[in-house]
Structures are given as structure tokens and as C-alpha cells.
Image (tube, grey):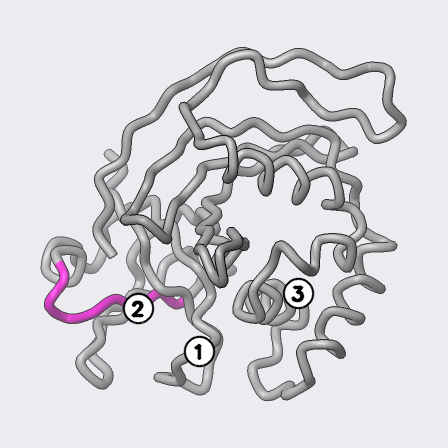
Amino acid sequence: MQLSVWKSWFYKKRHSNKANSMYIVEKGPAIPEEIRGVIDRFFLTYNHFKGARSLQTDTFIKEVFYATKQDPKDQRTIEEMEAYIQQKNVHRLRLKSFVIDEYLSIGEKVCMIGVTREFSNNQRNRVLYFLIKEDQSWRFHHIARSHHGKVLDKFQVNEQTGFVVGNEKAALLFLTHSGSADASTFILGDYVHVEGYLEVEQEVSSQLYYRIVRMNRVH
């Protein structure tokens, strides 16, 4: 998917009178009220995964599960995946704050937000969330993660172009359709910033791989 996005950076302030403190947005992208409400509810229940079940599609739960479990052969039910994530989250870092710095409407039933998250150890990361509208309700459908590294390998498989991105110690597999601009733009040795979501609905490889959303050369 090739996306041309616009960004709107804004300020934030600490919400100090709640136990699970979050930043309150003062300015930001213009997000429709209906979608903004779903986003706020999602992050209010972030540290309790099951609490946001009505706001997540099955695909979203699968993506989080396989990113956590790292075993593509594990074929649990959605309910079992959800329970596993909930149990793992008990021992994980707590979400301390979040900042929405990007919003893109992709048709009437799909939108994307860029979110910078800060955790209880003061580490931050940035992800893209895709929301879709199903049965008149907005739900989180994909989570696209960021990765920096060198293109270590490039190959073809079933009309898909694959990139192995990382370094000698760690690397991730990314795929895109061979007809896309990314497939023809990037070559071995390029240092890139790539964003992609874990592919859980279409089996192309026996390995876990990410579907490319955006890919940029880093100079």
C-alpha cells in the first residue's frame, strides 16, 4: 500500500490526577469525533487487553499474538490468543503516555493514525494503527511497526517481492507486491526505514513476515 500522508505535530501535557496517567491532547490532527472516541477508549484500556475486545478485529488480535509469541505454527483460537496476550501483559511495561501525531482517512471505512507511545521505563516507540468500520463501528485492524536497517536480501516469491531488513544480529522479513513502487525502488545495501504490519491472513512463507505500508531510504 502506497500512502501519501500529512503530519500535524502538537503539544501535550501530563494528566497528573489519574493513577494511569496519560497525556491530554491540546492540539492535533483533525480526527472525526466518532473515531476519536474509539481511539480514546482503546488507550484507556491499553494495559488491560481484554478490556478493548469490542474495539479490535480478529486480525488485530492475531497480529498482536504472533508478534508476541513469534511462532507462526501456533494455531490457537481467537479467545486463546486473547487470553495469552492478557497474561503476558501482566508482566510487561505499562503504557505511560501516547501522542497522536498523524491521521489519514483512506476512504469511508479505513483510516490510519500515527502514535508515539511512552512506557513506564521511559522508552518510546512509534507505530501506525489502521482502523476499519465494520457493522457501523470503528475497530483497530492493523498495527504497523517501524524498523530501521540495511536491505540484506531481496527476492521474489509468488508475485511478491521480499526484503530482509536489519543487520548481522537481527533482521525482519518484509513483503510487498512485485508491481509496487517499493519493489522496484530499493536494492541490496540500501539503508531504509520501513513500516509494516504482520501478515496473518495470507500465507506466502512459513516464516513470520510484515506487509510493507511505507518504505523510505535513509541517507
Q: CA distance from mark 1 to mark 3?
A: 17 Å
Q: CA distance from mark 1 to mark 2?
A: 14 Å
Q: In the rendered structure, which amino acid carries the disc numbered 3?
A: Thr
Q: In the rendered structure, which amino acid carries the disc numbered 2?
A: Leu
Residue at which label 1 appears: 201
Query: In the figure, residue 85 lies in which quadrant?
Result: bottom right
| Residue 113 disc label | none
Q: Residue placed at 39% from the left, 34% from the top?
A: 103
Question: Is 36 drawn above or below residue 174 in the view shown?
Answer: above
Residue at which label 3 appears: 68
5 or 138: nearer the eye?
138
6 or 145: nearer the eye?
6
Residue 194 belongs to magenta span = no
Question: On the rendered structure, is 81 left or right of 124?
Answer: right
Question: On the rendered structure, is 118 left or right of 130?
Answer: right
Query: In the figure, residue 18 lies in which quadrant?
Result: top right
* Highlighted magenta segment, given as a residue range: 173-180
| Residue 175 disc label | 2
Secondary structure type for disc 1: loop
